[in-house]
Image (cartoon, helix red, strand yellow):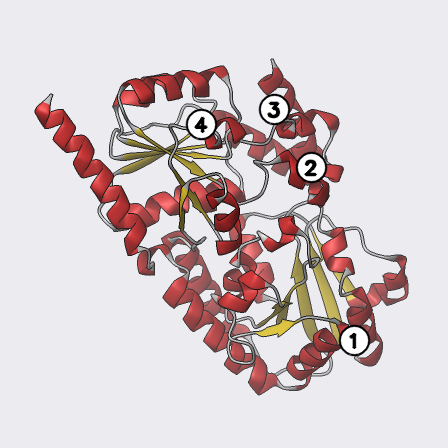
C-alpha cells in the first residue's frame, strides 16, 4: 500500500512538472519497465525507476561492466517476477530501492543461495539525519516524501549480510565506510549512446557556427536538472547580476525547475528559461551555451555528495565550466586548464569575466574539458580495476562453490 501511495505521488509530480504529454511518457516508460526482459548472467542491477539516477547508476554501470567482460542485466524493483531472479545471478546491486515485500523476498532468496548483495547509492538519501539538507524534499508532494521516512535503502545498507557498497564520490564513500562496509567508488560515466549523441551535435555545430558577434551574444547556462536547486543557484546570484549589468549582450540560460530571486526581474530580456527535455535535447541545450556554471551551497553534506556529472556532460560537448570549489570538483577540474573553480563571489565574477572576454580561452578550456571527459568519464574508457577484480573474485568463489556442491 505504501509503495502505491509513493508511486501515485511520483505520477502527480511528473505530470505537474513535465506536462501531460512528456510526463505521461515518463509514467508509461516506468510502467513498461516492470516487464522488461531480464537475461540471466553474472550481475543484476535492481533500481528504483527509469530516471537519470537509474540511467547513470544502473544502465551505464551495466554497460561499463559488460565492456569489461561481465554479463549484466537491469530491472526495476516493481518487476512482479523479482524473487525468481535469485538463482539466475551471483551478484545483486541494489540502487536506491524501497524496501517492499518483493525486495524483501528477493533478498531472502539471495541469502539462501549465498549470493552477493551490494548496496549502491549516489546520494545521502539512505540516512534521515541528512534530510534537512535536501532542498528537493521541500519541493515534493506529501505522497512522494513517504519514501524518505526511514531512509531510501537503509534496510539493505544496515543488513550485516551486506559487506560492500558502491558509490559516486570519495565524500560519500567515507560516510558509507562508517557503516563498516568496504566501498568502491565507481564514478558516473557517459554511455556509448551519449558519445554518439555528443559527436553528432558537435558535427552539426561545426557546420553551422560562425564567429561570435555582439548581436548573437554570449550564453551562460545553468542546468538544474531536478527540483530543489534554488538555494544552490542563489549562492552566486550577486555575481550573475553584476555580469548581466556589465555585459548586456550576455544571456543567462536556466534549464529545469528553478525559482529565482526578484533581483533578476529587470533582466528578463537577458534570461531564457528551458523546460524538461529528452536526453538528446538536453545535450543540445548544453551545446547552445558558451559557459556552463555549477554552483552548490557550501558546508552542505547533500551538496558535497554530488558527483561531477554536470562538468563532464558539458565537457563532452566542449563547453567550459565554472564550478564551486568543493572536494568533488577540486578533484575533477584542473583549475585554469580544463575548467575553473570558484570559492566566493569575487572568484565567480573574476573567472566568469575571463571566459566572457576571451573566446580563445573558452575554446581551449572546452577542448581540454572534452579530453578529460573522454579519458575519465566514459563507459568505454573507465579505470576501476580494483572494483572489477573484486567482482571477478566473487564470481570465481561462487563458481568454485557450485563445483564442490
Query: Left of 123 or right of it: where is 18?
Result: right
Determine the secondary structure under disc 2: helix
Dot 4 or dot 1, earlier in sequence: 4
In the rendering, which numbered label is found on residue 159?
A: 4
Q: Are marks 1 and 3 in contact (CB under 8 Å)?
A: no
Residue count near mark 3 (Cα–Cα under 10 Å), binned few <14, some 14–19, many ≥20: some
Residue count near mark 1 (Cα–Cα under 10 Å), binned few <14, some 14–19, many ≥20: some
Which residue: 11% across, 21% down?
A: 405
Dot 2 or dot 3, earlier in sequence: 3
Closer to the camera in the image, 307 or 37:
307
Dot 2 or dot 1, earlier in sequence: 2
Dot 4 or dot 2, earlier in sequence: 2
Which residue: 53% across, 44% down?
A: 52
Determine the secondary structure under disc 4: loop
In the rendering, which numbered label is found on residue 243?
A: 1
Closer to the camera in the image, 57 or 18:
57
Marks 4 and 2, how far apart in space?
40 Å
Q: Are marks 2 and 1 in contact (CB under 8 Å)?
A: no
Q: Dot 3 corresponds to which residue?
A: 7
Q: Dot 2 corresponds to which residue?
A: 19
Marks 4 and 1, how far apart in space?
51 Å
Q: Position of residue 317 (x, y in %)?
A: 50, 67
Determine the secondary structure under disc 3: helix
Dividing the picture into quadrants, the one containing residue 82 is top left
Mark 4 or 1, closer to the camera: 4
Q: Are marks 4 and 1 in contact (CB under 8 Å)?
A: no
Mark 4 or 2, closer to the camera: 4
Residue count near mark 4 (Cα–Cα under 10 Å), binned few <14, some 14–19, many ≥20: few
Which residue: 66% across, 25% down?
A: 146
Dot 1 or dot 3, earlier in sequence: 3
Amino acid at each position: 500500500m505504501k509503495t502505491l501511495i509513493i508511486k501515485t505521488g511520483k505520477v502527480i509530480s511528473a505530470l505537474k512538472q513535465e506536462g501531460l504529454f512528456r510526463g505521461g511518457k515518463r509514467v508509461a516508460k516506468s510502467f513498461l519497465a516492470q516487464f522488461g526482459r531480464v537475461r540471466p548472467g553474472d550481475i543484476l542491477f535492481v533500481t528504483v525507476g527509469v530516471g537519470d539516477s537509474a540511467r547513470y547508476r544502473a544502465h551505464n554501470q551495466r554497460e561499463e561492466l559488460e565492456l569489461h567482460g561481465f554479463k549484466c542485466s537491469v530491472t526495476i524493483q516493481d518487476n512482479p517476477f523479482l524473487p525468481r531472479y535469485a538463482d539466475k545471478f551471483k551478484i545483486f546491486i541494489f540502487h536506491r530501492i524501497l524496501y517492499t515485500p518483493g525486495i524483501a523476498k528477493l533478498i531472502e532468496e539471495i541469502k539462501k543461495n549465498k549470493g552477493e548483495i551490494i548496496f549502491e547509492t549516489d546520494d545521502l538519501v539512505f540516512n534521515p539525519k541528512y534530510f534537512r539538507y535536501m532542498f528537493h524534499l521541500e519541493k515534493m508532494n506529501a505522497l512522494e516524501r513517504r519514501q524518505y521516512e526511514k531512509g531510501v535503502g537503509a534496510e539493505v545498507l544496515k543488513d550485516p549480510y551486506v559487506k560492500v557498497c558502491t558509490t559516486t564520490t570519495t565524500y560519500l564513500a567515507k560516510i558509507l565506510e562508517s557503516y563498516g562496509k568496504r566501498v568502491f567508488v565507481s564514478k558516473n560515466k557517459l554511455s556509448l549512446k551519449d558519445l554518439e549523441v555528443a559527436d553528432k551535435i558537435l558535427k552539426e555545430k561545426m557546420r553551422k557556427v560562425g564567429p561570435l558577434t555582439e548581436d548573437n551574444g554570449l550564453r551562460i547556462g545553468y542546468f538544474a536538472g531536478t527540483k530543489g536547486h534554488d538555494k544552490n543557484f542563489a549562492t552566486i546570484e550577486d555575481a550573475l547580476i553584476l555580469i548581466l549589468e556589465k555585459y548586456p549582450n550576455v544571456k543567462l540560460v536556466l534549464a529545469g525547475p528553478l525559482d529565482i530571486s526578484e533581483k533578476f526581474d529587470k533582466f528578463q530580456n537577458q534570461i531564457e528559461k528551458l523546460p524538461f527535455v529528452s536526453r538528446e535535447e538536453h545535450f543540445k541545450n548544453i551545446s547552445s551555451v558558451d559557459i556552463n556554471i555549477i554552483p552548490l551551497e557550501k558546508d552542505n553534506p547533500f551538496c558535497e555528495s554530488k558527483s561531477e556529472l554536470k562538468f563532464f556532460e558539458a565537457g563532452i560537448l566542449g563547453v567550459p565550466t565554472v564550478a564551486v570549489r568543493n572536494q568533488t570538483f577540486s578533484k575533477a577540474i584542473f583549475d585554469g586548464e580544463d575548467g575553473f573553480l570558484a570559492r566566493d563571489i569575487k572568484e565567480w565574477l573574476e573567472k566568469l569575466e575571463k571566459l566572457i572576454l576571451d573566446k580563445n580561452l573558452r575554446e581551449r578550456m572546452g577542448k581540454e574539458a572534452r579530453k578529460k571527459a573522454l579519458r575519465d568519464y566514459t563507459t568505454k574508457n573507465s579505470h576501476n580495476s580494483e572494483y572489477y577484480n573484486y567482482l571477478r573474485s566473487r564470481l570465481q568463489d561462487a563458481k568454485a562453490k557450485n563445483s564442490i556442491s
